[in-house]
Amino acid sequence: MVTLLSEEEPNVEDMDPALLIEQAAAAESEGEAEIAARIYNAAGNIYMSVEEFAEALTCFEKSLEIFKKLDDEGGISDTMYNLGVAQINLEHWDEAITSCETAMTIFEKIGNKDGAADALYGIALANLGKGDFETAMVVFLKAQKAYKAVDNQQGIAVSLMDIGNAHQEQQNTELAEKTFKKALKLYRELDDKAGIADALSVLGEIAEDRGDLRRAAENFVEAAQNYMEAEIFEISREVIERAEQMMWDVPKATRRRLRPTIDDIIDALPKQAEVSDEDSDDDELDDL
């Protein structure tokens, strides 16, 4: 599931969210309600970034409660949207729809067009999650129009990927492929390495399912390159291994062309032992 976040509080990304929660509680007890609400919201965003969605939900609920007491529409809409995103990731579909719809209404009231577009996208995702494909497609199109109105090409590309995935789940592979290619074109224009890699990966899977191993291998190799450049090393390794497994089943000319690139990517990737050692070091630091 794509993680959707509104603007995070500055300079807190590397902080311990548990410490932030303590600071928020202290601020609230000292009568600094607005500060407390923003710190709770920031802690929730950090929990979201590490996929601890239940903890994020609790933080957003506390933040929202305070913003409502303050009658702060900007804070309410921002936090309500974040709450909806946490609910999407927890698969609380109906609650997520309600939260995103409420956020969208307030975003529209205060003139936050970017926020309203994000909220529409959240509504589409939640409807898709609960299995309402038709409603989801209608809302996705509305979200794309909203993103286009605010010139948010990234939002359009991300929504295209989700629309493509939805078509693939409906076994409409041809339409899914066209949609993924549109997303790929946008990601290339944005020079978004991770987005390029994601689009190429799903296009590679479609080609593989069709038995077009040459095209699949080409897509997987390029995807692995982009994942590596985005420093998403583990997925890069997985994708390049899939490409390597196809080498004896593709034409010789393709094999000769791709083999050097495959070797270069494998050589450039961090060794798995090194990654494990780094993780162990991080764990030891966490215990200090």
Image: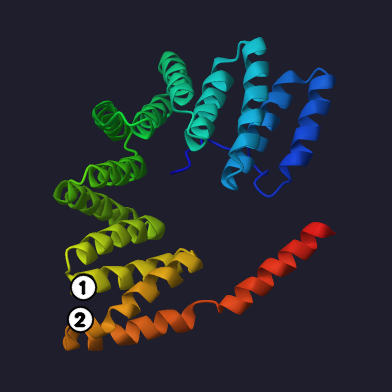
Q: Position of residue 148 (x, y in %)?
A: 28, 34
Amino acid type for the residue under numbered disc 1: Leu
Relative vertical location of residue 224 with respect to residue 78 in this rendering, above or below: below
In front of the other: 10 or 196: 196
* Separation of residues labelled 2 and 1 (CA atoms): 6 Å
Which numbered disc covers residue 226?
Answer: none
The residue where tag 1 is placed is 213
The residue where tag 2 is placed is 250
**Quadrant location of residue 147?**
top left
| Rendered-image quadrant of the C terminus | bottom right
Classed neighbour count for the residue bearing mark 1: other residues with Cα under 10 Å, few (<14), some (14–19), many (≥20)? many
| Rendered-image quadrant of the N terminus | top left
Q: Position of residue 122 (x, y in %)?
A: 41, 31
Q: Is residue 215 left or right of residue 274?
A: left
Q: Is residue 157 left or right of residue 111?
A: left
**Quadrant location of residue 139?**
top left
Mark 2: secondary structure: loop
